[in-house]
Amino acid sequence: MTQDVYIELKEVRKAYRIGKEDISIFSGLDLAIPQGDFVAIMGPSGSGKSTLLNMLAGIDRPDAGSVSIGDHRLDWMGERALSSWRAHNIGIVFQFYNLLPMLTSAENVELPLLLKPLSTKERRDRVGKVLDLVGLTGREKQYPSSMSGGQQQRVGIARAIVSDPGLLLCDEPTGDLDRASADDVLQMLNFLNRELGKTIIMVTHDPRAAASARRTLHLDKGQFIEAEKAA
Ligand SMILES: Nc1ncnc2c1ncn2[C@@H]1O[C@H](COP(=O)(O)OP(=O)(O)OP(=O)(O)O)[C@@H](O)[C@H]1O
């Protein structure tokens, strides 16, 4: 793992206006994560974990400070540049999978590729490859409603990696799963990190999920407290 900083937040400030009051979430948050890391982010409800993920995805913006990923300063980019950058560089895994119920598993995975200049055959090949990677070969034509939570999350992971992004943002990826399916998903994320070199940021309330990451950062009162663990 190279130690070059890949994700960097400097002096990030963020507040939400509720009625006439500004509620401060971050008032000078710093963060530096090298490429190839797998970081779990834990913290009490309302500590800003989702706000942080949204800023890393370029969905939300800081009020002040900088958010950099690779060579890109996200806080300097316009909406169009951001959405194109996001489509190439970020995969997002959601707690409740966010699959479209009227599409098959293969069609759900194919969705992000429709934005790219690829032939039907190229799209099918890529979808087949990632479904194979997550162990769902043979289930291409199944609809989400006929799949278990664990299988739906695997479809969610396949969709997140089909564009081959360098960074995966996972928001409670095991939050809706039983222990065995959760372990399965964590194993898969570890494989993506260790074998394919994906950088992973995972928000979780589950200490066992956090223990499967390389390290855990605790977010509390707008600041990080690190609990180092051996990689
Ligand atoms: N769009 C918004 N408008 C106003 N307040 C918001 C908005 N988004 C988040 N907040 C507030 O910001 C704070 C941080 O929210 P956030 O969702 O980032 O926390 P979290 O740590 O992810 O919480 P949880 O663990 O419950 O998901 C909360 O107090 C929340 O109510």
Image (tube, helix red, strand yellow):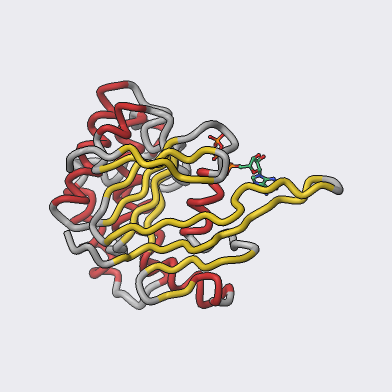
Q: Position of residue 32 (x, y in %)?
A: 37, 59
The answer to whether residue 73 is seen in the rendering is yes
The number of discs equals 0
Residue name at image x 34 percent, y 54 percent: 168
Q: Give the position of the C terminus as an image quadrant.
A: top left
Q: In the picture provided, is 210 more to the left or to the right than 73?
A: left
> From this viewpoint, is residue 138 visible?
no
Q: Residue at the spot x=39%, y=45% of the render?
A: 170
Look at the picture and state if 225 lies above or below 166. Answer: above
The N terminus - image quarter: bottom left
Please tell me which residue lies in front, 23 or 144.
23
In the rendered image, which quarter is residue 34 located in?
bottom left
Name of the residue lying farthest toward the right: 20
Instruction: From the viewer's perspective, tell me whether residue 23 is left or right of residue 206.
Output: right
Which image quadrant for residue 12? bottom right
Figure quarter occupied by ligand 1: top right
Q: Residue 181: where, in percent of width, then height?
A: 28, 27
Which residue is nearer to you in this view: 66 or 193?
66
In the image, residue 183 sits, relative to residue 37, either above or below, namely: above
